[in-house]
């Protein structure tokens, strides 16, 4: 039986690497085997020791030096180099007998979502047994306009990549009860979010956000936001349950 793949996706600094580590620890404590894969060639340091690390093939500093590129250009080049090396990386991953493959994606979410090379990567790494977890950054999601911006990014990832997606509020332990109640209301009731947008401001940008939100409502983007804390462990079991519901009709992985 193939391993379940969980891709952790989101903007830089939203907590992908920290949550990757926490999910691996939680799964192992439940008796499951889980490996981690780092796909960010520019990662300086990680909380976990990756079982498979793209930096063994591609390092951002070396790409910058070899091709005379700055950090942004090197990230683009590295994304394409990743696609060129993905068959070899996939062979290494497939060499593990494991229940879960946790894939920590690059911080530049636009590179992962928009470039065709990313489709090559995920098509090679994963069959049908894969789920995307999109992390909302609480620093952005606390305001209605920020929440809509997060919805836009998550919807873009959902439209571009071929896997089912769940949405989580990362670093939930940093969010006050009042903030969480608002965010929970916005994620479950778009009319509440409409009203919050209008309360914050009424300008051209607000009108754009409202119209975009009406379009997102038809596809259900952002509904069912799961609060998750890598520090306290809150929500990790809920992520597991959602992945199992999607991939295994709610059944636990056979140990």
Image (spheres, grey):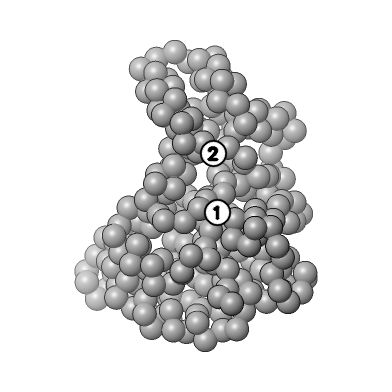
Return the residue at label 1.
Answer: 133
Q: Residue furthest left?
A: 68
Q: Position of residue 194 (x, y in %)?
A: 52, 20
Q: Position of residue 8 (x, y in %)?
A: 53, 58
Q: Is residue 124 above or below residue 240?
A: below
Q: Residues within 10 Å of mark 1 (few under 14, many from 20)?
A: many
Q: Mark 2 touching mark 1, by CB under 8 A?
A: no
Return the residue at label 2.
Answer: 222
Say which of 24 and 202 sits in front: 24
- Identified at 48% across, 30% down, the residue is 217
- Identified at 71% across, 74% down, the residue is 254
Query: Does dot 1 land on a helix, a strand or a loop?
Result: strand
41 relative position to 146: left or right: left
- Identified at 67% across, 63% down, the residue is 23
- Quadrant in which the N terminus appears: bottom right
Q: Give how far apart the Cα atoms at labels 2 and 1 are.
A: 11 Å
Q: Is residue 69 visible?
A: yes
Which corner quadrant of the image does residue 79 belong to?
Answer: bottom left
Q: Residues within 10 Å of mark 2 (few under 14, many from 20)?
A: many
Which corner quadrant of the image does residue 84 belong to?
Answer: bottom left
- Identified at 39% across, 72% down, the residue is 124
Query: Does dot 2 land on a helix, a strand or a loop?
Result: loop
């Amino acid at each position: 039986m193939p391993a379940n793949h969980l891709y952790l996706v989101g903007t830089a600094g939203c907590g992908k690497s920290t949550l990757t580590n926490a999910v691996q620890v939680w799964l192992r404590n439940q008796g499951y085997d889980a490996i981690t894969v780092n796909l960010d060639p520019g990662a300086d340091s990680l909380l976990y020791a990756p079982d498979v690390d793209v930096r063994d093939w591609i390092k951002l500093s070396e790409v910058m030096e070899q091709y005379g590129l700055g950090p942004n250009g090197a990230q683009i080049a590295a994304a394409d180099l990743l696609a060129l090396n993905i068959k070899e990386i996939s062979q290494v991953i497939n060499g593990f007998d494991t229940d879960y493959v946790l894939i920590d994606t690059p911080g530049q979410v636009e590179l992962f979502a928009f470039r065709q090379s990313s489709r090559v990567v995920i098509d090679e790494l994963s069959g049908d047994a894969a789920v995307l977890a999109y992390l909302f950054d609480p620093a952005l999601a606390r305001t209605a306009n920020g929440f809509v911006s997060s919805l836009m990014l998550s919807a873009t990832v959902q439209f571009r990549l071929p896997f089912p997606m769940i949405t989580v509020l990362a670093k939930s332990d940093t969010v006050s009860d009042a903030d969480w109640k608002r965010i929970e209301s916005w994620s479950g009731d778009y009319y509440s979010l409409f009203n919050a947008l209008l309360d914050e401001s009424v300008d051209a940008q607000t009108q754009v956000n409202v119209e975009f939100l009406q379009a997102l409502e038809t596809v259900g983007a952002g509904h069912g936001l799961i609060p998750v804390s890598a520090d306290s462990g809150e929500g990790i079991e809920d992520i597991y349950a959602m992945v199992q519901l999607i991939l295994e009709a709610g059944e636990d992985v056979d140990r």
